[in-house]
Amino acid sequence: MIKTPRNEYINRELSWLQFNARVLQEAADENVPLLERLRFVGIFSNNLDEFFKVRYATIKRIDQAGKRGKRELGGWKASELLEQITKNVIKQQSESLKIIDTIKERLEDHDIFVIKEDEVTPDQDSYIRNYFVSKVSPALMTFMLNDLDAFPHLKDSAAYLAVKLLLKKEKPSSDTVSAILESKTPEKVYALIEIPRNIDRFVVLPRKEGKDFVILLDDLIRYCMEIIFNIFDYKSVTAHMIKITRDSQLDIDSDLSKSFIEKISSSVQSRRDGEPVRFVYDKEIDKDTLQFLMDKMGIDNTDSIIPGGRYHNRRDYMNFPMLKDGILTNKPLKPLAIHGLSLHKSLLETIAQKDFLQYTPYHTFSYTVKFLRESALDPKVKTIKITIYRLASISHIASSLINAVKNGKKVTVSIELQARFDEKANIRYAELMQREGVQLIFGVPGLKVHCKACVIEREEAGRLKRYGFISTGNFNESTAKVYTDYTLFTANESLLKEVNKVFKFFEINYKVSRYKHLLVSPHYTRLSLIRLVDKEIQNSKNGLPAEIRLKLNSLTDREMIDKLYEASTAGVKIQLIIRGICCLVPGVPGMSENIEAKSIVDKFLEHPRLYIFHNNGDAKVYISSADWMTRNLDRRVEISCPIYDKDIKQELIDTYNICWADNVKARKLSEKQDNVYIRNDAPKVRSQVKTYEYYLQKLKN
């Protein structure tokens, strides 16, 4: 349980850590297949790395600048918050190590053995040594530390083995070794070995008697220490892992002579020199080795120093070998077709008749790709405009847009080069599309373009007709397999005319259009949402039914939280499904007694934003790219799209209700932040499975 200095708001960083604790709960859940549990350990670790690079680094900068920031930090002083975060992370890291050990024990029940270097059998020795010499040794970067004038630059989030050699008293003949023996600490030699990132972390050894054996690359290197250091005459060698996490903030160059792509590229490159914000080490490391490293790196006790386990970069567990023919993983759900929308016919002709909703990964993402491919080939299509935030490493979206240019279409792409940790991929695609003739727009100065929308213009009967789609998620084939997201395909002229206005804003930033239908950040979303909440408050005061139901990734904006508190006090019933950060405190008498909040963490990552306002029985329903965070409302370009099709509106309400009924994977969000699973006497509902069944039934009707 986490105690907060005040009870109006929960600190966002501590709330985020509790979200990551829910991910860790999945790793601990005995009902989750074993290899999926390892995957959740990897997700937990990857999340934590990004948290330190971004959020922890931000708090550290606040502390170093001497800023108080207590309101922004939920009543915490920056220094106290940094200390609390470190305490929580140490506890979670310890728990994650126990979970890994338990999973490995369970794997042995299925004849899968993850072995260490001291468990290698004689018949495995030859295979490991040959593998090391042929694949690993050429890729190793090894630093001898004793006589280096400057400590080597440690890469962000790379894993290193800190090696200590205790030399024998007699001097060997090697001149190199003699030089080291004459250094200040002749009895000890320290070294660092960088674990190669371009080699699989898990090495599958030859199967024996139906049993599978896996050794981590780290332990394979430990096993071959004598090959690495054969020029030294040593009596013992130890190797323990360490890792540095660096501040990932991008500092954008103001040089007017550089293009925006050049500025972002330069900033991404300079990220490697970011200040260290976390130092993780194997808690079994010798004290003298640890002190030697900390002295050389200039790390002191004011930094976040995390004693960890034997292995770091546990994010690699997301790629643990899929052994036993998939019986230890989730049964794959085949993505479904959208009822009434055929991939074998013209999508545009069908969408011209009515709107359709794609809900990935329950529905196949192929509809998005097919829409663009058809538009690229259709002679009647004249223009394509689309926003891009994150692309897959091999993107059919990008290739479709390039294909459209080659077929004479005018293609305009607003690409966000500052999509955190995807900058390199977006820069690569931006340069490729630019070379092929795609007109690129690099967002709006001071604003990230986070909305997800596309509009095309097609010549029909002597005039241009618009078609398009608006989504809650990225146009990314890879993430569409694991992120749940809504996409509305429509030919509604009222909606698409306003989407077109958003693209005009990208080109002429000083001209702000008015919108009757879409809620567009940063100019109108906040005010529009407040009006929608106020309408529910007024209905409640007038004795009418009043209800607000939201599905978000995060809820952190103080003004919107206060507005929900006001609605609760006025009697409005509020249901919140928040996957990640929730700074609102639900269920507090006199403040939020009419607010319930839940979080669902399961096989798929819950990513859509959905707003449902009761509106006295005539529900107003929006899908959106915007969470209720200050950055989404005030510092990004976002689109919230109203749903006018009655069937789709009901479909969205139905899928929300399925999520709300979850009593298998849902956790109650409360001031205690204890992530208690919701259990009741109702029939078991695992919402992601139930949602798939819902769409399967639609196809049968």
Image (cartoon, rainbow, N blue to C red):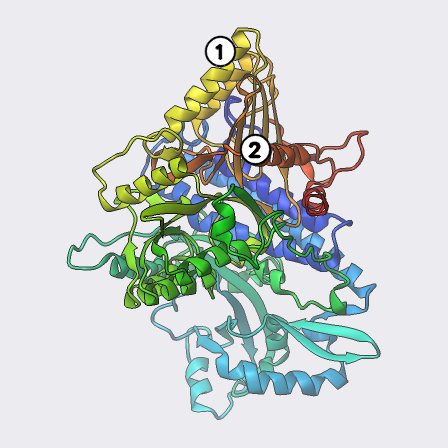
Where residue 560 is drawn, which disc sits there?
A: none
Residue 281 in view here: yes
Residue at screen point 52% across, 41% down: 354
Looking at the rendered structure, the kind of residue marked 1 is Gln
- Distance from disc 2 to disc 1, alpha carbons, whole Å, reads 23 Å
Residue found farthest to the left? 257
Residue at screen point 44% across, 49% down: 303
Q: Which residue is mark 1?
A: 538
Q: Secondary structure at mark 1?
A: helix
Residue found farthest to the bottom? 173
Q: Secondary structure at mark 2?
A: helix
Residue found farthest to the top? 542
Q: Is residue 457 left or right of residue 230?
A: left
Looking at the rendered structure, the kind of residue marked 2 is Lys
Quarter where residue 273 is shown: bottom left
Quarter where residue 551 is shown: top right
Q: Nearer the viewer, residue 216 or 289?
A: 216
Residue 603 image point, x, y percent: 66, 50
Crowdedness near tag 2: few (<14), some (14–19) or many (≥20) residues, C-alpha within 10 Å? some
Q: Nearer the viewer, residue 648 or 598?
A: 648
Q: Nearer the viewer, residue 620 or 462?
A: 462
Labelled pair 2, 1 in contact (Cβ < 8 Å):
no
Q: Nearer the viewer, residue 68 or 48?
A: 48
Among numbered discs 2 and 1, the one appearing first in the sequence:
1
Q: Which residue is mark 2?
A: 649
